[in-house]
Image: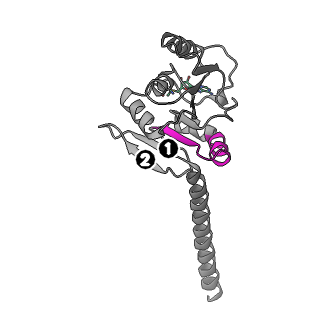
């Protein structure tokens, strides 16, 4: 890994590329418009971005990568395809990079990394109508996907999120808390009644 100063708490996932089959599904499910801006948070060698730009009307894509080795690989791959005007690769930490112009996020991160990136995703989904997020293999904690797609014999999944995921997610959490509190109150009530009847 490069010597770039990224604190260990920023770490989102080790490098593991998304396979070709999954990338085709991403391109299909994202339903890119030429006005969309795709961002791969932790873009590795840039393969998702390159495929998305080549196989859809997408005109603009951004990759953020903090490992210098993969950052360089992504830059080279983009240059090899002659896509420098459409695809920017940023050498930095995906947790802090400005993504205000992004309309579609792609993430392939470990669950711990998804937990860290969750506030950024929620901000984007709530502030940018039409924004969507695709997460490869792992779901984003406490968000309810609008759709889940299985794409391999190993039953790997792609999770699709939109603004509805945040609203439904908070509602589900509220319902759960409400039920949990009711059960605790009921248990207390039964215990107190039982104790006072002795
Ligand atoms: C599982 S790989 C996914 C690569 C690519 N998105 C794909 O699907 O082929 C995760 C990538 O995230 C990068 N990464 C981990 N933490 C990061 C951070 N804080 N900021 C930017 N990139 C990060 C890793 O170096 C790695 O290349």
Which residue corresponds to the image point at 62% horizontal and 47% vertical from the top-left? 129
Where 96 falls versus 162 (above or below)?
above
Which residue corresponds to the image point at 64% horizontal and 29% vertical from the top-left? 94
**Residue identifier under label 2:** 148
Left or right? Give the position of 172 relative to 19.
Answer: right
- Residue 139's label in the rendered image is 1
- Quarter assignment of residue 2: top right
Residue 125: x and y in percent read 62, 46
- Residue 1's label in the rendered image is none
Q: Is residue 169 magenta?
A: no
- For ligand 1, give the image quadrant: top right
- Quarter assignment of residue 93: top right
Identify the mark nearer the N-term, 2 or 1: 1
The residue tagged with tag 1: helix, strand or loop?
loop
Q: Nearer the viewer, residue 187 or 96?
A: 96
Q: Nearer the viewer, mark 2 or mark 1?
A: 2
For the C terminus, the image quarter is bottom right
Which residue corresponds to the image point at 49% horizontal and 51% vertical from the top-left? 146
Q: Nearer the viewer, residue 111 or 77?
A: 77
Task: Tell me whether circle 2 and circle 1 mark residues in contact (CB < 8 Å).
Answer: yes
**Would you say residue 42 is visible in this rendering?**
no
For the N terminus, the image quarter is top right
Q: CA distance from mark 2 to mark 1?
A: 9 Å
Where 55 falls versus 184 (above or below)?
above
Residue 148: x and y in percent read 43, 47
Density class for disc 1 (Cα within 10 Å; few <14, some 14-19, many ≥20) is many
Density class for disc 2 (Cα within 10 Å; few <14, some 14-19, many ≥20) is some
Figure coloring = one colour
Region rendered in magenta: 118-136
């Amino acid at each position: 890994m490069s010597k770039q100063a990224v604190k260990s708490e920023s770490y989102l996932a080790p490098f593991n590329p998304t396979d070709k089959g999954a990338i085709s599904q991403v391109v299909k499910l994202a339903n890119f418009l030429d006005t969309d801006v795709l961002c791969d948070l932790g873009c590795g060698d840039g393969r998702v971005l390159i495929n998305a730009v080549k196989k859809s009307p997408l005109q603009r894509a951004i990759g953020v990568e903090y490992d210098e080795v993969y950052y360089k690989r992504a830059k080279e791959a983009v240059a090899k395809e002659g896509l420098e005007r459409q695809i920017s690769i940023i050498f930095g930490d995906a947790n802090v990079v400005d993504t205000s112009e992004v309309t579609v996020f792609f993430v392939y991160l470990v669950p711990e990394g998804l937990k860290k990136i969750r506030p950024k995703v929620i901000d984007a989904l709530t502030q940018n109508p039409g924004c969507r997020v695709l997460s490869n293999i792992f779901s984003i904690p406490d968000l309810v996907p609008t759709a889940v797609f299985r794409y391999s014999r190993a039953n790997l999944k792609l999770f699709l999120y939109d603004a509805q995921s945040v609203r439904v997610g908070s509602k589900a959490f509220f319902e759960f808390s409400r039920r949990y509190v009711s059960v605790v109150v009921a248990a207390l009530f039964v215990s107190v009644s039982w104790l006072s009847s002795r």
